[in-house]
Amino acid sequence: MSKFLTRRRFLIGSTLGASALTLSGCDLFDQNDKVAGVIRSAETLTMTAQRLLQGRDALAREFTEADISPSFRVNGTSAPDSEEYAELLEAKFASWRLKVDGLVERPREFSLADLKALPARTQITRHDCVEGWSAIGKWTGVPLASLLRLTGLKPTARFVVLHCADELEKTLDGSGRYYESIDLIDAVHPQTILAYQMNGQDLTVGHGAPLRLRVERQLGYKSAKYLMRIELVDSFAGLWGGNGGYWEDRGYEWYAGI
Ligand SMILES: Nc1nc2c(c(=O)[nH]1)N[C@H]1C(S)=C(S)[C@@H](COP(=O)(O)O)O[C@H]1N2
Ligand SMILES: [Mo]
């Protein structure tokens, strides 16, 4: 069993100031400092409040088939425009691989078939975009926790960075690469999945083919589409703007709790 799947309760102590926050449940982490590392700015209040009120393992609301939105908007990139992506798409993603590397014990690559062979989770959830629209969709994929169990985590791993195939506006260092990051608490949340299906069909290009993240307790921009690589890091300071995500580098909050 990998390191991060052991252990008992733990406390986030003094970093929070007024209240020490007890995180209950089958605790997955022993490194208090991991959590302390993300306790650092205004959005911490939202994060702390959400976790205090609902518990770190609380599930986002799930809906029924009847609730699925008849139309679900495509937002942000609707098709990555690189030649590499075009080739992958052309070959129906047969040669696409998800690289998992960085601070993992066993770096590896997963084909779509590898991912589909792992136990899947299906969830019908509401997607909330920061721009003010919402839609309910059914997502099927592999829990990120399962993948991390296969690769193991080095003790210094703190964040999961999702690297995507698409580029939006190139403003920072000439890069407009879409990327996102979440902490290990969200990474092992049961509804955090790497989805390859939406509403019972393989993901369309618009919705992030061949694989996207679903992180259901945060706003839509955290659910990165067009995944190419998952990197475990101890800090995202060295990545592009240093704020942990494409939109975060442009002023959005890193913890986008709903
Ligand atoms: N790679 C990538 N992921 C992305 C985006 C993007 O432009 N590129 N847009 C984000 C935003 S703002 C939203 S609301 C959702 C939109 O997902 P959808 O197109 O499936 O509705 O994807 C998120 N993930
Ligand atoms: Mo969004």
Image: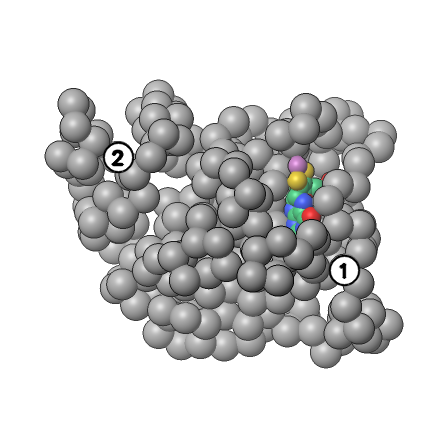
Q: Quadrant of the N terminus?
A: bottom left
Give the residue type at disc 2.
Ser
According to the image, what is the colour scheme of the structure? one colour
- Label 2 residue SS: loop
Mark linked to residue 24: 2
Q: Is mark 1 within 8 Å of ligand 1?
A: yes
Residue 129 placement: quadrant: top right
Disc number at residue 133? none
The disc label shown at residue 80, or none: 1
Res 7 seen here: no
Which marked residue is nearer to the observer: mark 1 or mark 2?
A: 1
Q: Label 1 amino acid? A: Pro
Viewed as shown, does residue 169 lie left or right of 234?
Answer: right
Residue 198 vs 95, above or below: the answer is: above
Q: Quadrant of ligand 1?
A: top right
Image vertical order of residue 225 relative to residue 13, above or below: below
- Residue occupying image coordinates x 16% and y 23%: 18
Mark 2 nearby-residue class (10 Å; few <14, some 14–19, many ≥20): some
Q: CA distance from mark 1 to mark 2?
A: 41 Å
- The answer to whether mark 1 and mark 2 are in CB contact below 8 A is no
Q: Residue at x 25, y 35 (%)?
A: 23
**Secondary structure type for disc 1:** loop
In depth, the one of 157 and 190 nearer the eye is: 157
Asked whether, in this view, residue 243 is left or right of residue 41, the answer is right
Q: Check the image and report above or below for 184 versus 138.
A: below
Q: Position of residue 9 (x, y in %)?
A: 19, 41
